[in-house]
Amino acid sequence: MSFAARRTGLATRLGVLLGLGVFLVWSLAPVVWLVLSSFLTQRALIAQPPDLAPASFTLQNFVAVMQSAASLGHGMLNSFIVASFSTALALALGAPAAYALARLSLPRANVISFMILATQMLPGIAIAIPLFIVITRLGLIDNVWTLGLVYLSFNLPIVIWILRGFFLGIPQGLERAAAVDGAGPVRTFRYIILPISIPPLAAAAVFAFIEAWNEFFFALILTRKSAETVPLVVAQFAGQYQTVFGQMMAAALISVAPVILLAIIFKDQIVRGFADGMMKG
Amino acid sequence: MPQVELRNISKSFGSVTVCHDVNLIIEDRAFVTLLGPSGCGKTTTLNMLAGLEDPSAGDILMDGQRVNERSPVDRDVAMVFQNYALYPHMTVAENIGFTLRMRHMGRGEIRRRVEEVARSLELGPLLDRLPAQLSGGQQQRVAIGRALVREPRVFLFDEPFSNLDASLRIRMRAEVKELHQRLGVTSIFVTHDQEEAMSISDQIAVMSKGRIEQFGTPEEVYARPATRTVAAFIGNPQIDLASGRVEHGADGLICRVGEAELALPAGTEAVAGQAVEVGVRSEHVQLSDTGAAARVRLVQPVGPATHVTLDWAGGTLTATLPGIARLAAGSATAFAIAPENLLVFDPDSGKRIGGRTDA
């Protein structure tokens, strides 16, 4: 690209800004509404239009949620176990698999990679019922480890694809140097490839963790009480006769807090990881 | 016994053959360069020697033993890569010591050997730095250190200086040559820079299109090129070639190029009427009052010598004259070439059929 082409006109720049603005509003509006409504009284919330007068704001929703803190805490603990378990397994299995697919001369590596991605194309509902039947028959229903394994089956392909893209971009010279230095594929992976792959590993981990943390549908089908995760607990604020929106939003806000925290802590690594990973998908 | 030998080595990637029937014998303690333009198969040849690529056909021998199936580490070779290939997350000391760690050597012994190598390469103060904190020259030194610490039987260098600036390249060249003189370890060096090859090697294998065109000392490939390709690749300024026809002259065979007549060297394998190509190095062109007519096109003084570009019946020709030559562009002149300095090639096969047979 020449320098002349880089010097974009004012109109173009305004257009880009406008586009980004629309995108931001589109993405953030639900979050803003979530935060606002968690602080509004039920009456102000269901008024048409919603009553945003200072008097309508209250901490009552959070107080109420804290009164049922036991179930929210239980849900968060379950979510944490399920998400950590499935993320850890996805990385432990996905990283070597991605490396093998990217770098070792496996026959039909591209076909295998595509088939791994193709598993993601099935709608969840298509496998939900067979999965439910199998898991019930095995007596593994309402079990955090079962749910973790189910999430692993969604997360593993994504982790493999993120990491494979990154591994494809690593200069071959490093592996050749390691081979001449006396390291086989396993030791090359362990001592050279893994240590330089922290950003994409972090990106993949955060991605997998968030997916597992937020998942609702399979958790609803495969758990009862003891293994219920945070999204299910939040949903229970929708009562049989009346949905207490404010409390539901307060609970939702509390439940997403750890994930947002995680994303902020690993922000740089996520951005770098995805940028590297997507370069050669 | 030759230390490294390639026997009928061929290498194909799919339908593309990059090495054709390569044969090479490298004696113990020699410094041999594989020289050629990019894509000539020199790096592939080096990778096959290292064990990083498998030959499609042929045998690789080290100390008389076939090593085709041996892993790089079992061949006891060390390699310096074009892009250094330093491990970015390891310090200089860890980079150099990695290969010893892979051999399960004790920490104390690793530290002792790393420090010894670092001292010899003046890397001592940099041992705790990461590669990103080093200059290009320092990174290349670390890469050499990583090869040295192994005390290997053979050193392989894959265009190690191509990313360095000109002055650093010349300094590193001298360092590697001194290193070879001191350690006497067989070294195989790949480069596309003919001047680098000439200055550093005991022997040069000139490669083109996956074949070895000529294998000889720097003097041999320069003064007695086996083919037109070798003659054209070696030497700066490049050799000038002209097409002509062989005739009988007063004192033996001559080559006629337009109006000009050039006496052919004794022993040229050609007959009257045959088409030939003649070539001459610029230092062998002498400006004179008699001889082939020419016109001065360009005068380029470079300090110790002056390159004069001439237009003549055969095209253009460069003469290198000592010192600063005062010549005007556009002026008429004439040149002569001593018959023994003329190189004669068969235009079809490209093989040399006349010219020097001595040094």
Image: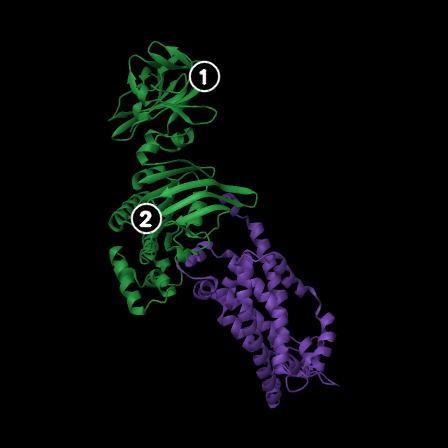
Chain colours: A purple, B green
Residue B235 seen anywhere in this rendered image of the structure: no
- Outermost residue, top side: B250
Q: Which mark is residue B274?
A: 1
Mark 1 is surrounded, within 10 Å at the Cα level, by few (under 14), some (14 to 19) or many (20 or more) other residues, namely few
Residue B46 seen anywhere in this rendered image of the structure: yes
Mark 2 is surrounded, within 10 Å at the Cα level, by few (under 14), some (14 to 19) or many (20 or more) other residues, namely many
Amino acid type assigned to the residue bearing label 1 in the image:
Gln
Where residue A213 sits in the image (x, y, percent)? 60, 76
Residue underneath mark 2: B186
Q: In this view of the protein, which residue sits in the foreground, A211 or B216?
A: B216
Looking at the rendering, which quadrant does residue B216 occupy?
top left
- Same chain for the residues at labels 1 and 2, yes or no? yes
Looking at the rendering, which quadrant does residue B294 occupy?
top left
Q: Dots 1 and 2: beta carbons under 8 Å? A: no
Indicate the secondary structure of the residue bearing disc 2.
strand
CA separation, marks 1 and 2?
45 Å
Where residue B252 sits in the image (x, y, percent)? 35, 13
Q: Is residue B271 above or below residue A177?
A: above
Q: Identify which residue is drawn at 72% across, 81% down.
A: A137
Looking at the rendering, which quadrant does residue A241 occupy?
bottom right
Where residue A123 sits in the image (x, y, percent)? 71, 68
Q: Identify which residue is drawn at 25% across, 26% down.
A: B322
Q: Is residue A150 above or below residue B63?
A: below
Indicate the secondary structure of the residue bearing disc 1.
loop
Position of residue B18 in the picture relative to residue A143 (left or right): left
Q: In this view of the protein, which residue sits in the foreground, B203 or B284?
A: B203
Chain identity of mark 1: B
Chain identity of mark 2: B
Amino acid type assigned to the residue bearing label 2 in the image:
Thr
